[in-house]
Amino acid sequence: MSTPSSHIASPVPARLLQLRAAMKQHHIDAYIIPSADPHLSEYLPERWQGRSYFSGFTGSVGTLIVTADFAGLWVDSRYWSQAEKELAPTGIEMMKIASAASIAHIDWLVSTMQTGQVVAVDGAVLGLMAARILTQQLNAKSVQLKTDTDLLQEIWRDRPGLPLAPIFEHLAPFATVSRKDKLSLVREQMRAKGADWHFVSTVDDLAWIFNLRGSDVSYNPVFAGHALIGLDEATIFVAEGKVSSQLQATLVQDQVHVAAYAEAAIALAQLGTAGSTSILIDPRRITLGFHQAIPAGVNVIDAINPSVFIKSRKNAQETDFVREAMEQDGAALCEFFSWLESALGRETITEITIDEKICAARARQPHFISPSFGTIAGFNGNGAMPHYRATPESHAVIEGDGLLLIDSGGQYLNGTTDITRVFPVGTVSEAQKRDFTLVLKGMINLSKAVFPRGTPSPMLDALARAPIWAQGINYGHGTGHGVGYFLNVHEGPQSISATLAEPHTAMEIGMITSNEPGIYRPEQWGVRIENLLLTVPAVQTEFGEYVKFESLTLCPIDTRCIVNAMLNEDEINWLNNYHGTVLQRLAPRVSGEALAWLKERTSPITN
């Protein structure tokens, strides 16, 4: 293990001093810095990474609250080990929560703040739904909520500006539905709701509706922008210079206009000036600031963005392209794993090396654009941190005995991939094999599920956990998330998680969802096995329409880590059939050492 950089003095205490001075000047008793931007994105452009800047915590989810004599960061179990290390030199207290959907920080504010005190947060990055809950709770305590002050802008001297990377089209054949037709689908839902206008802030919805892509957010091919869609025309609001004159001319053909990023709120404020009008907004996908910009006379219709449902259900052409992307990805992984197996013990390999080699293998595949998230390569104890990320300052060398967990993915023009595999290094203990086999049993159990169409996705979570629960073990993250089509690697509305806050969770044909149960032993090892699943028709009976899963991901599951006797006949048959499919689909795409490795690792097993 290389030496961590925790001995280096942190700039966070000095930044907190500046923040507290500004709070005092504005008569603010508690300031909230959420992990959010004006688009409520999961991964944030640098301009809106204020929570990281003022806390030193680099995880993707967390809420920072600062008072005159306290600073706390609320994080869920995926980040406890990481937060403990990163917060150590800052004086910020880690506040453990059950899940990212928790409102424990609001409960803390309610119990801590006194009548008449002031809590502040920048309304431009506060979700409307979260604002409603926060306002209701604080009002009951007679605590004032101030949302018009961005203290970060005052004291973050070198704060990055708006991202300026150019926007490009997602073109046919991979864009299987035209921009005009997608707008027609959205407008059909607008008319059904009685809406004249629809405001879109979420970057994946924006990219999908207009068949546009960008690189403003790491790993997800999206861009920072907003859109105001009318029944006949639409306007996209982005930073100047991001859309070429040629692309603007193409957009105009579909009655789509481009305006400056800052003009989005102005356009909302001008609605209704020519008479009564109505606008559809999604309270889970719009900020308080934009909601406040809508004039009082405009009829506001609260409903989920129509594009959320439509883009989650991939059509037949899209799923065919995704299958092709999975073959490309699987071929890259065969190349990578065959190299890893031959190189171990012959050359120095670190967790950083794993990231470099796996990204290079994917980059040699057709239509590859970028990784779909930062590679998680965790050896032994590092693998016990679900969102671990090796750095040049702190990482492990792959040597000795143990388990190497690798969670990685790619963005291709024809699909988005996300896969986790565990690789044995040296001698694997019986305890490690038992954990691996339990996780595999849970993963198989969900893969084999048949259930009524429209079943709420959280109901499926227990299927993957059942074999793990039976041994008195659990894991702290959800079992599965939706995945986009050359879009966000985390996509709603479905999520196989018991703690999901989104009410719209019905599992429908065409949805792509991850299946990734795990077991984590802090400071020892972690096991997670992940495939992507496509919801497909199963059977029609007198009890209704039933659906099942097709396993999209194509890569061997390492049988050297399995206790064969723990698997029943159905589970062994599933694994052997899966490996038969993997071999059949990938063999034509690999050769030499990669092909030899593929054949060996897909050999059938018995008990």
Image (cartoon, rainbow, N blue to C red):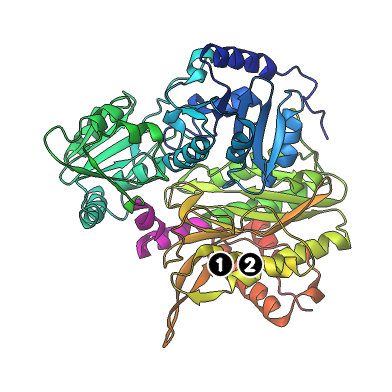
| Residue 505, numbered circle | none
> Does 558 sit above or below residue 391?
below
Is there any visible trace of residue 579 in the rendered image?
no
Front in this rendered view, residue 128 or 140 = 140
Residue 314 part of the magenta segment: yes
The amino acid type found where label 1 is placed reads Met
Callout 1: SS = helix
> What is the C-alpha distance between the residues marked 2 and 1?
7 Å
Residue 259 part of the magenta segment: no
Q: Which residue in the protein does label 1 denote?
A: 459
Q: Residue furthest left?
A: 274
Q: Please give left or right for residue 592 compared with residue 586 in the image.
A: right
Q: Are marks 2 and 1 in contact (CB under 8 Å)?
A: yes
Can you give x and y, in whole percent of width and height, for residue 459 in the image? 56, 67
* Residue density around tag 1, few if under 14, some if 14–19, many if 20 or more, within 10 Å: some
Can you give x and y, in whole percent of width and height, for residue 236 in the image? 28, 35
| Residue 462, numbered circle | 2
The quadrant the C terminus occupies is bottom right
The amino acid type found where label 2 is placed reads Ala
Task: Name the quadrant containing residue 80.
Answer: top right
Residue located 30% across and 41% down the image: 199
Task: Name the quadrant containing residue 254.
Answer: top left
> Does 562 sit above or below residue 84?
below
The quadrant the N terminus occupies is top right
Front in this rendered view, residue 346 or 406 = 406
Residue located 52% across and 35% down the image: 138
Callout 2: SS = helix
Residue located 88% across and 63% down the image: 430
| Image: magenta residue range | 307-326
Is there any visible trace of residue 279 in the rendered image?
yes
